Image: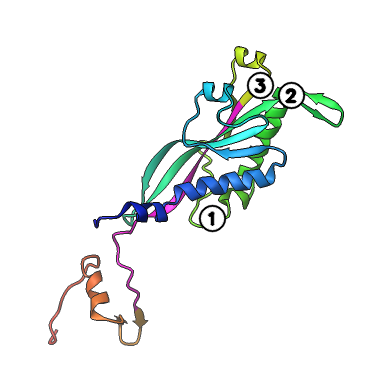
Amino acid sequence: MNPVSLSSLITNDRLGPMQMAIVGTVSRLIEGVRVVSHPGKVDISELVQKSVVSAPGIGIGWSRIRRAALSDGSYSLLIEWTAYVVAEAQVVGMRRVEKEAVGLAIGSRVLSILADQAEPFWGLTGVLPPEETPAPELKPLFTVRDASQGVAYYSVTWSQAIADIGAGHFPDATGTAYPDAGVIGYVSVDELNSLLGFLPAEEVGPDA
């Protein structure tokens, strides 16, 4: 493994851009709701103090990242994302809608975005669809004391992977088959040599 500079790590990071892409997509698909990024797992006190986002709003954060190894030696990052929903009572069409209904509506919309065929890729490549085990989930966060303050808190959680991080162990040499001759040709000797440790073969002499 070769040394890597901090600037290179930042330039090639895929987690930060994915988080911002989620923020941008959710913001575009839920009008009138402020959507911001959050650096990690939210403490309920942060929501109560409105240090994450004011109502109606959503803070996009994550709680855990795991490495999922692939058979070729590369790996994926499996990220546990959380959308923190903050809701207050709203007046909609001359009618008061209670905070719980507002929070459920916003949370349900996030779930519908995650169920879409295209949107949960967030406009990125190399991102897998949200995991179905466990499936995306909407649940309440607020307590009775928090509810008395006129604000309701919910969270939508889901897991999603960024695929193919790092290089695999296997060579990427590509050969051309010549069936009549019974051989596979390669562009260079170096390409052929890169395969020698991975192909079971018997070396025979010219008189065999």
Residue at 31% x, 87% y is: 181
Image: 24 above or below 134: below
**Of pointers 2 and 3, the one earlier in the residue sequence:** 2
Judge by depth and name the residue closer to the eye, 58 or 190: 58
1 and 2 marks in contact (CB < 8 Å): no
On the picture, is 90 further left or further right than 195?
A: right
Badge 3 density bin: few <14, some 14–19, many ≥20, Cα 10 Å:
many
Disc 1 is placed on an element classified as loop
Image: 180 above or below 191: below
Location of mark 1 (residue)? 124
| Relative image position of residue 207 (x, y in whole percent) | 12, 87
| Relative image position of residue 118 (x, y in whole percent) | 62, 53
Image: 189 above or below 27: below
Location of mark 3 (residue)? 151
What is the spatial separation of the Cα atoms under label 3 and label 1, in whole angstroms?
34 Å
| Relative image position of residue 34 (x, y in whole percent) | 65, 38
| Residue interval drawn in magenta | 154-175
Mark toward the viewer: 1 or 2? 2
Residue at 66% x, 29% y is: 55
- Kind of residue indicated by mark 2: Ala
- Kind of residue indicated by mark 1: Leu
